[in-house]
Image (cartoon, rainbow, N blue to C red):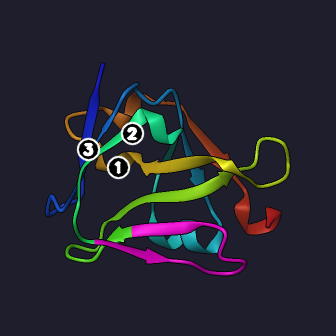
């Protein structure tokens, strides 16, 4: 089942090839202020229909791109190297999609994993 999502104004629209199995809620300084619920995908599983107003914020070591809509301000998605091995793998990036932007989808039915990013990094 393809799942569609968009920011509030529609300047960022995307489709996910598969439904999210779970979402992550992180309490680090940026995630707690941005308020996202993150679903993780490989770039091959995400199609952007429109990303006309993308703005990016980078901080710290600047290895990740925290994207948001420059028009309506919605937190949209992040682009990061894959860290499954413990080291950054830039050849296998990961997209973190803000599941709060999924259209006509019951995100309350998805398990939430809480990460203590405030104390982990």
Name the quarter where the N terminus is drawn: top left
Which element type, helix, strand or loop, lies under badge 1? helix
Residue 85 is situated, as x and y percent measured from the top left of the image, at 84, 42
Which element type, helix, strand or loop, lies under badge 3? strand
Looking at this rendering, what residue extends furthest in the front direction? 91
The residue shown at (75%, 49%) is 83
Above or below 37: residue 23? above
Name the quarter where the C terminus is drawn: bottom right
Whether tag 1 and tag 3 are in contact, CB under 8 A, the answer is: no
Along the line of sight, the residue nearer the viewer: 56 or 89: 89
The residue shown at (37%, 36%) is 107
Query: Which disc number belongs to residue 46?
Result: 2
The residue identified by callout 1 is: 100
Q: Which residues are magenta?
A: 54-67
The residue identified by callout 3 is: 5
Mark 2–mark 3 Cα distance, whole angstroms, equals 11 Å
Q: Earlier in the sequence, mark 1 or mark 2?
A: 2
């Amino acid at each position: 089942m393809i799942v569609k999502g968009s920011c509030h104004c529609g300047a960022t629209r995307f489709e996910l090839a598969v439904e999210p199995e779970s979402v992550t809620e992180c309490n680090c300084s940026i995630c707690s202020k941005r308020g996202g619920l993150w679903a993780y995908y490989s770039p091959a599983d995400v199609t952007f229909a429109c990303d006309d107003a993308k703005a990016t914020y980078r901080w710290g070591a600047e290895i990740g791109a925290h994207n948001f809509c420059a028009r309506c301000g919605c937190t949209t998605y992040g682009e990061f190297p894959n860290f499954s091995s413990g080291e950054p793998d830039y050849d296998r990036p990961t997209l973190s999609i803000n599941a709060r932007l999924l259209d006509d989808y019951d995100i309350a039915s998805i398990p939430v994993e809480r990460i203590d990013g405030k104390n982990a990094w």
